[in-house]
Amino acid sequence: MPSIHEEMLLARDNSALRHNQPIANNNITTHGSDLDWAICALHAFLLLSVIVWTYMTNPRRRVFHYFAISILSVATIYYFVIASNLGGAAVPVEFRGGNILNRTRQVFYARWVGYFINFSLIWFALLLMSGVGWASILFTLGLNMLWASMFLIGMFVRSSYKWGFFVIAVILWGLIVWQTMGIARSHAYTVESNTHRTFTILALWELFLMMLYPISWALSEGGNRITNDAEQIFYSVLDVLSQGVFSILLLSLSRSLDLDILGLAFTENGRIKNRVSEQFTGTNHSATIADTTTGYAHGAAEAHADPARP
């Protein structure tokens, strides 16, 4: 009969792979799942902290807090899915060299769906900060969506044609660099020096980390050169830096920005005017018009009654 200590250890055992069976030869193990649970918990902790931070912040300055909450929520959800050994598929591998001789590899589409959403949110927040026009914002967001989609589609391709999607994604990253560091950064410079500095720091941070994602993809889903557990380590480091740490940096560095100049300061009553105030103003306005019209008519009547009046 197991002792109390043994029962406690068994109670904390990771049973995700027992409930959700491995689907491929090269599948994550309990070690990889443990790491994913830890990253899920980290993002969840940051999410709760940012929620508390949000409601301690003036409502007029919460715009970037809402972006951070959304980013951390998505990261928490897709790490919960991956840690549970869900959101993946078994794909025949193109390369079977090295120490990885298995025929199929588990790939997580849940991860790249999360990237599709989160990197769009990240760049939406930064582009709003830069003051660039809506056409450039929508175009850059579209580039980010395509960037994530290319890796998502490419990882399901067994043949060497997957590298065509890889090349397209790298080209899209280059266009994102131009849109952000070329166009958006120049707009941020015209706003104010503090906005320009903050945008430059955060944009360079994200662009550098986005440059590393193709390397991770090439070693794991694309080239099958590292194990699935090693893949979890690589992506976990990138995700914590590009989403978790970024969210905290975004809130910390944006505290000194003038949101009124950027047009991002929320009003106390929201975007829609207060109906009671509007009705009151409208009533006064109508009364003023009525008084003016009555006074004009009275003056005209006096003028007709007195011919000597000019």
Image (cartoon, rainbow, N blue to C red):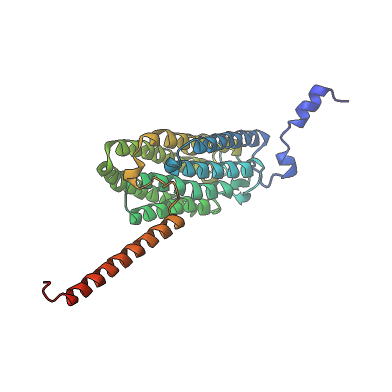
What residue occupies the far right of the structure in this picture?
1
Q: Quadrant of residue 254?
A: top left
Residue 157 at x, y = what percent?
54, 54
- The front one of 221 and 38 is 38
In the displayed structure, would residue 193 be above or below residue 274? above
In the displayed structure, would residue 268 be above or below residue 293? above
In the displayed structure, would residue 58 be above or below residue 161? above
Q: In the rendered image, is residue 160 in sight?
A: no
Name the quadrant of the C terminus: bottom left
Point 60% across, 44% down: residue: 77
- The front one of 64 and 28 is 64
Point 54% across, 50% down: residue: 113
Q: Quadrant of residue 265?
A: top left
Count of marks overlaid on the render = 0
- The front one of 103 and 49 is 49
In the displayed structure, would residue 283 be above or below residue 199? below
Residue 220 at x, y = what percent?
54, 42
Point 41% across, 58% down: residue: 280
Residue 245 at x, y = what percent?
47, 34
Drawn side of residue 182 relative to residue 165, left or right: left
Drawn side of residue 46 relative to residue 60, left or right: right
Q: In the rendered image, is residue 209 in sight?
A: yes
Name the quadrant of the N terminus: top right
Point 43% across, 53% down: residue: 271
Residue 94 at x, y = what percent?
55, 49
